[in-house]
């Protein structure tokens, strides 16, 4: 499935418990480890994000967040995107999965509120979402889920 990250930071807000900086080798270069797998990895802060990385204010306010996460304007970015851990590279944000009444998985809705499905009926129902639900409402995900329930689907 194609995935386009909206850089909300949600996926990494609790990664401080899973990604550890073992030691700083040189400025902006670190030996790290993935706590869940015990896998070591070498991280280098991306050159275009080094100034962000130096500001510790946000990370001090969010002690559970990955130590490499930082705000950049309206987005939350990974400062080691090019050298992040394997678990980070393979992660794909899913807001919810859409099932049929018989509990068959029909599709997924990603963090960008994009539907990924091969089911033509679900795709047809989804096309109406654009016309009836404003994307900029705070409860848009709940409203989409409620709409899908009305259409006979189970979003979870």
Image: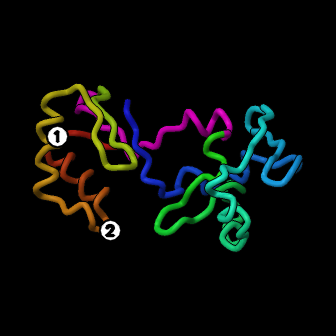
Contact, mark 1 vs mark 2 (Cβ under 8 Å):
no
Q: Residue at x 27, y 51 (%)?
A: 145
For residue 143: magenta? Answer: no
Q: Taking 104 as reference, is 51 above or below it?
A: below
Mark 2, Cα crowd under 10 Å, few <14 / some 14-19 / many 20+, is few
Q: Residue at x 71, y 53 (%)?
A: 16
Q: Which residue is mark 1?
A: 152
Q: Residue at x 56, y 56 (%)?
A: 77
Q: Position of residue 101 (x, y in %)?
A: 23, 33
| Highlighted magenta segment, given as a residue range | 83-102
Q: Position of residue 91 (x, y in %)?
A: 54, 37
Secondary element at image label 2: loop
Q: Name the foreground residue: 96 vs 154.
A: 96
Residue 156 is left or right of residue 58, and the answer is: left
Place residue 51 in its image quadrant. bottom right
Nearest to viewer (mark 1 / mark 2): 2
Q: Name the foreground residue: 105 vs 110.
A: 110
Q: Position of residue 38 (x, y in %)?
A: 80, 33
The image shows a total of numbered marks equal to 2
Place residue 104 in its image quadrant. top left
Quarter of the rendering occupied by the C terminus: top left
Secondary element at image label 1: loop
Q: Residue at x 42, y 42 (%)?
A: 94
Residue 138 is labelled as 2
Q: Position of residue 110 (x, y in %)?
A: 37, 43
Mark 1, Cα crowd under 10 Å, few <14 / some 14-19 / many 20+, is few
């Amino acid at each position: 499935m194609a995935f386009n990250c909206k850089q909300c930071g949600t996926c990494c807000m609790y990664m401080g418990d899973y990604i550890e900086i073992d030691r700083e080798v040189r400025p902006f270069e670190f030996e790290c480890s993935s706590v869940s797998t015990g896998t070591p990895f070498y991280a280098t802060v991306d050159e275009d994000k080094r100034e962000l990385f130096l500001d510790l204010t946000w990370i001090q306010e969010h002690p559970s967040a990955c130590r490499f996460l930082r705000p950049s304007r309206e987005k939350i970015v990974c400062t080691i995107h090019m050298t992040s851990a394997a678990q980070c590279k393979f992660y794909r944000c899913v807001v919810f999965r859409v099932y049929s009444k018989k509990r068959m998985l029909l599709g997924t809705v990603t963090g960008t509120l994009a539907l990924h499905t091969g089911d033509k009926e679900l795709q047809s129902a989804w096309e109406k979402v654009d016309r009836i639900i404003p994307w900029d409402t705070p409860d848009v995900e709940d409203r989409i889920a409620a709409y899908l329930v009305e259409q006979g689907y189970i979003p979870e």
